[in-house]
Image (spheres, rainbow, N blue to C red):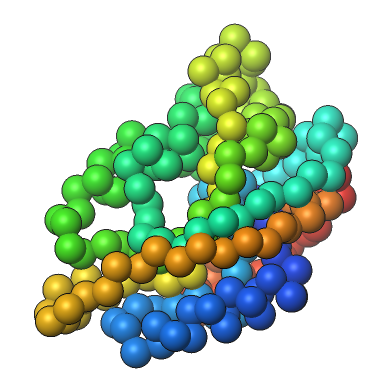
Amino acid sequence: MKKRVFIGINLPEKEKRLLTKTINKWADLPVRWTKQASLHTTVLFIGSASDDEIIEICDNVKQAARENGPFDLEFNRISFGPEQDRVKLLCNHAAQPEKSLRNHAAQPEKSLRNHTANKPGAPRMIWAFGEKSEELASLKNAIERQLFGIGEHRIEHAKNPIVPHITLGRIYGSRWKKLDNPPKIDEKISFSVPVESVEIMESNPVKDGVEYIILESVKL
């Protein structure tokens, strides 16, 4: 059976507790909040992969990790996501893969259409936004090169820094629209996440949300 796989960065427990404490003030809103244990930031979504493909993915991520050292991600705001300009920053790294894993590459154009098709007043998610990170872009590019065989000439457009985010909750749109005075969520935060490893993770739907399982952790 295939697993739904992505590359992510886990958060330290202290920062997970801080985010959970912050979002508790909005607990009554029609939002499916991310469980504290599942808080993370995504580096690269891959998709369905067999056990053999996961072994290949892990080997390629290890190779990419050798090209990148530890770094920090700075987070500064909680607000609705995704924002138009931030979506472009997140999507501009995609390219057409050339190896056996090409069917697992995310389709950014479709994703962008889905993000921007939402009507004003019915946001999709609540995110913790980070500051632009060249180190995160370098890590993602290295992983893409190893997984998909993307040459340097294919990713010249993708060297801009990435704006990382943490999905804190997914909004129930129909119930949100019924709110008499839906709040404008825009909260300043300030914390740093030391990135010393990257995780190959499985996304597993469960009754009350999504469970994330670490398949392998790779040190930078």
Assign the N terminus to one quadrant of the image. bottom right
Of the pair 27 and 173, the residue shown nearer to us: 27
Left or right: 82, with 197 as reference point: left
In the rendered view, tell whether residue 71 sits above or below residue 149.
below
Q: Residue at x 79, y 44 (%)?
A: 71
Where is 97 relative to 52, above or below?
A: above
Q: Would you identify the image quadrant in which residue 76 lies?
A: bottom right
**Residue 71 in sight in this render:** yes
Q: Residue furthest top?
A: 153
Q: Residue at x 12, y 81 (%)?
A: 180
Residue 33 in picture, x, y percent from top left: 45, 78
Between 49 and 210, the one nearer to me in the picture: 210
The spot of residue 57 in percent (x, y) is: 70, 44
The C terminus: image quadrant: top right
| Residue 200 seen in the figure | no
Which of the 4 image quadrants contains residue 109? top left
Q: Is residue 175 left or right of residue 214?
A: left
Relative to residue 34, is residue 1 depicted above or below?
above
Using the rendered view, name the quadrant where residue 122 is placed: bottom left
Residue 111 horizontal/vertical position (percent): 34, 44
Q: Tell me residue 142's x, y (percent).
A: 71, 30
Of 102 and 169, the residue lying toward us? 169
Q: Residue at x 48, y 69 (%)?
A: 168
* Residue at 83%, 30% in the rendered image: 67
Q: Is residue 118 left or right of residue 162?
A: left
Q: Is 198 positioned to the left or the right of 44 in the image? A: right
